[in-house]
Image: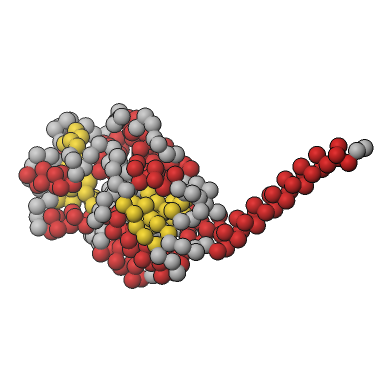
Amino acid sequence: MPLQTLRTPLATALLSALALVASAQASAQGAGAWPSKPIRIVVPFQAGSATDLLSRQVGAGLSNSLGQPVLVENKPGAAAMIGSDTAARAPGDGYTLLMSGPASMVTNRFLYKKLSYNPDAFEKVAIVAVTPNVLLANPSLPFSTLAEMVAYAKANPGKLTYASFGAGTTSHMAGEFLRQAAGIDIVHVPYKGAAEAIPALISGQVSLYFDTIMTALPQVKAGKLRALGVSTASRAAMAPDIPTIAEQGYPGFDIAPWYGIVASHGTPPAVVSRLNTEINKLLNTPEFRERLVATGAEARGGSVADFEAFVKTEVPRTEKLVRQAAIALQ
């Protein structure tokens, strides 16, 4: 058989094998050398927001452990979609991370007809923290506990209203979750932000509102608002005396803003694993945990698999809430 006849299939096979080996070696070397330059955390919200402040704390901690600057890049707008799209389009080399949350990873896919990015394409790294919310009520209303509120709502369908800082936000989803879980008729009133919702609640324009523990407590302690329950599965470290909604007869009630680091699609597993390890080390330091509690947040952590399982649970639950509430923004 002529040499040229043999050369084509044999050479092709050999070249393909060599290319695969070279690619694997390059990938391993790249992951081993990582990080060799600054890393950026894309924050899909404005500077000074809770997500921004947490990202800067995480970035500072990772800078120390990784030996490279970890910089925050704010890309706010369009319900976290601008920042999420920025991170999604970046190379999967471990140098672009996203501080994700309910909007970017879960809720947006059900609120908007089309997203410019695929939430499921991100490489999950680690859940960083959660910010417990508190169900607040105007103190002039004739109830002081969650059970009394539910009884009042059932006796007066459609009379109670609940505020949110925007349609589709966590405060809206929490109110909808409560409405469905308790089987009560309460009316949603969206505001442009928490800065509008809290004064409306204090003045009696609305009846109820889920707010972050950090901003809620001063109003509760001053007697301007009444706390009915915490939205997370366990009591908040900042306010351990406030019972959870779950323990008051609604097991499984667990909804609050959460924050998780994800990486661009294709980031090497070795890099993802290293990031997960370093983030968990940071979250387990007493000083960092105390700083989080002081801002109303609580450290989470866990494995990559934990994060993936969490999102898989949140997606169908959120879809049910959105569909039953008939929420659509675009």
Between 214 and 109, the residue placed more toward the observer is 109
At a point 30% along the width and 68% down the height, the residue shown is 290
Q: Where is residue 121 in the image (x, y as percent from the top left)?
A: 48, 43
The relative height of residue 25 versus residue 311 in the rendered view (above or below) is below
Q: How many circles with numbers are drawn on the protein?
A: 0
Colour scheme in use: secondary structure
At a point 44% along the width and 44% down the height, the residue shown is 89
Q: In this view, does 284 lie to the left or right of 10?
A: left
The relative height of residue 14 versus residue 110 in the rendered view (above or below) is below
Image quadrant occupied by the N terminus: top right
Between 79 and 323, the residue placed more toward the observer is 79
At a point 17% along the width and 39% down the height, the residue shown is 191
Image-quadrant location for residue 285 = bottom left
Q: Is residue 212 visible?
A: yes
Image quadrant occupied by the C terminus: top left
Q: Can residue 257 be seen in this view?
A: no
Between 245 and 325, the residue placed more toward the observer is 325
At a point 33% along the width and 33% down the height, the residue shown is 111
Between 199 and 120, the residue placed more toward the observer is 120
Q: Where is residue 36 in the image (x, y as percent from the top left)?
A: 50, 64
Q: Position of residue 299 (x, y in %)?
A: 36, 60
Residue that protrudes farthest toward the right in the picture: 1
Q: Where is residue 254 in the image (x, y as percent from the top left)?
A: 34, 47
